[in-house]
Image: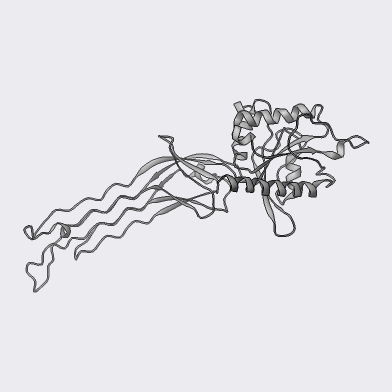
Amino acid sequence: MSFVDTVQVRVAAGTGGSGASSFARFKFVPKGGPDGGDGGHGGSVFVVADGNLTTLLDYRYRNQWKAERGQHGKGKTQTGASGDDIELPVPPGTIVRDADSGEQLGELLVTGERLLVARGGRGGRGNARFATATHRAPREWEPGEAGQERTLEFELKLIADVGLVGEPNAGKSTLLSVISAARPKIADYPFTTLEPNLGVVAMGDHRTFVVADIPGIIEGAHRGRGLGLQFLRHVERTRVLAFLVPADDPDPAASYHRLRHEVRQYSAVLADKPHIVVVSKGDLLGPDGVPPLLEGATGPSIVLSAATGAGVEEFKRLCWRSIQDAKAIDAAAS
């Protein structure tokens, strides 16, 4: 299944039903008076967060949605039936904008959240509404109002607790496959990961957190080189970043600072998030097993090997502690 994180959708709410112009006709009531009912309201369009979704792919195949119109009013002051609302399901983490104005209408972060994006038209009044003491036989009625129409832009930013950031072939996908049930594509060539992958990490005592594997970041990613610009948005909502530098990197310190630079150029806020330094592929260290020196690195560091499992459990515990610290900082700031 392809990963789609930006789409445009045309939505149209339903038009309200028109009011009726009718007069009562009863056998023993020769002048029953006006009894035209109101029209029903048009259906509205809502966007709803659905935790079962992870992509916006469905909207590539259908990008026009229209709610049901309201029914016209009837005699005997019967109000027309209102049109049914429609709901457009999106993954949690989706931002909704008006494509024409660029205005952000809202963002849906929690499963079940609903956002009204196009309001249905009001039903028109029937002639019974226009009757007065001096105007007893009105024939006036109102047409229903048109529903709102607009073009929307959906942008998905995955929600994860930890974002794995590294250059191509740093071992991110392998690590994700070891610590979670996720099964990303793994191969020995660069840019194996072409789309973000999410995995739920279980700590063994009902504690869990979510990790996102982001496609490889290369120099110039913040300007659109490689796949970086397209997918850097997906680490914006993470609480903690984990920078992966492989043990066999010829210049690990330069790689670490290059990753930090690309993230900072993309977003200063993102760069200031707590981070962990991970020396991956620890099984490739020399006979002495001494990890490379990462001069100028900040934040806690760890050496691990997804191939042998060494350091993996410690990495999970370190992630958990870092997440809790980040939550505490966010709570204190709010």
Q: Quadrant of the N terminus?
A: top right
Tally the numbered discs.
0
Q: Position of residue 24 (x, y in %)?
A: 13, 66
Out of 80 and 242, give the one closest to the viewer: 242
Q: Position of residue 78 (x, y in %)?
A: 23, 64
**Residue lying at the far right of the rendered structure:** 287
Q: Position of residue 331 (x, y in %)?
A: 59, 48
26 lies left or right of 242: left
Q: How is the image coloured?
A: one colour
For the point 23% across and 53% down, the residue is 124
190 lies left or right of 331: right
Q: In this orientation, does residue 21 appear? A: no
Q: Dividing the picture into quarters, in which one does residue 329 lie?
A: top right
Q: Is residue 272 above or below residue 24?
A: above
Out of 62 and 151, give the one closest to the viewer: 151
Q: Dividing the picture into quarters, in which one does residue 134 lie?
A: bottom left
Q: Is residue 164 above or below residue 200?
A: above
For the point 27% across and 48% down, the residue is 145
**Residue lying at the far front of the rendered structure:** 332
Out of 26 and 301, give the one closest to the viewer: 301
Q: In this orientation, does residue 315 appear? A: yes
